[in-house]
Image: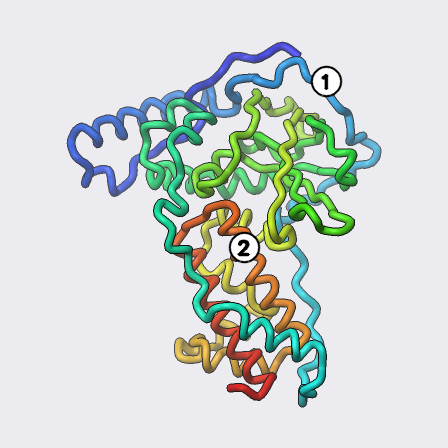
Amino acid sequence: MVAKPVNRHRVLMRKSSNVENMAPYARKISLNSGRKISQQLSHHFTSRIRARTAGLPRTKVLKDEHLPTPPATPAPAFQSAPPAVAAPDVNVAATDPLADLADSILKNHPKLLVPPPVENFGVVRSDSLAWIDPALESLPVSFLQDSLKGKSAAMLRVCAGIRAPNLPQHLIPPFLDVQAWNLETEMPSHMLAIYPLPGTPNPAVTLYPIHDVIFASHCARWPKCPQTTVEAPSTPGGDIHLPVVRIPIPAPAAFPLLASYLYKKQPNLVLKNALPAMDDAFLATLTPAQWLAPQFGRMVAGKFSLEVLVGRARFILGFRANLLALGVADERVWHDLQRAWSVIRVALEVKLGQA
């Protein structure tokens, strides 16, 4: 495979309201960099940098005949099915193993889920961004994150238009050829192979197409992924050639929610998806006071079984473990996670008669 020219300005930059508060020299650098990148967007945006993996063999995994015809409106990427809702418990026996597990969760985990008091936790390194694009090295991370907001929704839709296969862990190749059905913006840069930490019996691997700049700009511990040039096909359904990056994380089932948040940045997205599935119409009727943990927790305890609540508690703790493993310090995601955890703790205490 012949390496393609490197594009050093492939990420759209736009002005931020914070730029005017910078020192004159820093403001000049940020604005000049942002203008230069924006001016070259239409010509360069879809090209990828540094074909470091040139020469590796292609692995044709997906066949056209095995791929379903995509719907007119593609389903959002990184979606997981809402948990099944069982009938609420009337009483919980003291000797019930599920009750013992719930009690153990309450006793062994803190009431507050906050970022660890570690110096520089969640601080994204400039060299990690420079690995993706040298033009990003001198830009403030907040400026980069703000610049990505304008097109991250389209990037997510492009990811939703990729058809990825289900493969066992021992058959994950270094590259995958997959079909791209949505061509409205930059193609994904990589295919993530997410699997549990070593020691997990029968580990399953799930593949997710992603844009590495989204994750590298939010995750301080994001690995330096191999960089190649990924060009959009000429027509929808054409092949793209993605490098595969294997990443073990503590809670693979909670990864789609984190990925969805990093692309969408929607308020309450983590809160709503960390709690048991509830109808939006019902949530819209809640007053501000009812959203507070004591009132909302009692309401949740009356609507859902102990099994569902324990499952949500474990999901929240797994989501937190992923944040720690990837080095995510986003204030909103931690705030929403804490709100969900407070509600679930109250609901568990009500179920166990500890409230």
Q: Is residue 18 left or right of residue 42?
A: left
Secondary structure state at the residue bearing disc 1: loop
The colouring scheme, among rainbow, by chain, secondary structure or one colour, is rainbow
Give the percent coordinates (x, y) of residue 209: 62, 37
**Residue at 48 percent of width and 34 percent of height:** 213
* Amino acid found under the numbered disc labelled 1: Pro
Q: Name the residue that disc number 2 marks.
A: 321
Q: Residue at x 16, y 34 (%)?
A: 23
Question: Contact, CB < 8 Å: mark 1 with mark 2?
Answer: no
Under circle 2, the secondary element is helix
View extreme (right): residue: 65
187 or 319: nearer the eye?
A: 319
Mark 2 is on which residue type?
A: Ala
Sooner in the amino-acid sequence: mark 1 or mark 2: 1
Q: Which mark is residue 271?
A: none
Q: Who is closer to the viewer here, 109 or 240?
A: 109
Residue marked by disc 1:
57
Q: In the rendered image, which quarter is residue 192 located in?
A: top right
Q: Is residue 230 above or below residue 4?
A: below
**Picture quadrant where residue 150 is located:** top left
Question: In x, y percent, where is residue 86?
Answer: 71, 76
In the rendered view, tell whether residue 310 sits above or below residue 65. Answer: below
Coordinates of residue 288 in the picture (x, y in percent): 40, 76
Which residue is pictured at 60% across the width and 54% down the height?
254
Q: Is residue 158 above or below residue 313?
A: above
Which residue is painted at 57% across and 53% down in the image?
257
In three-dimensional space, the C-alpha distance between marks 1 and 2, rounded to whole angstroms, equals 35 Å
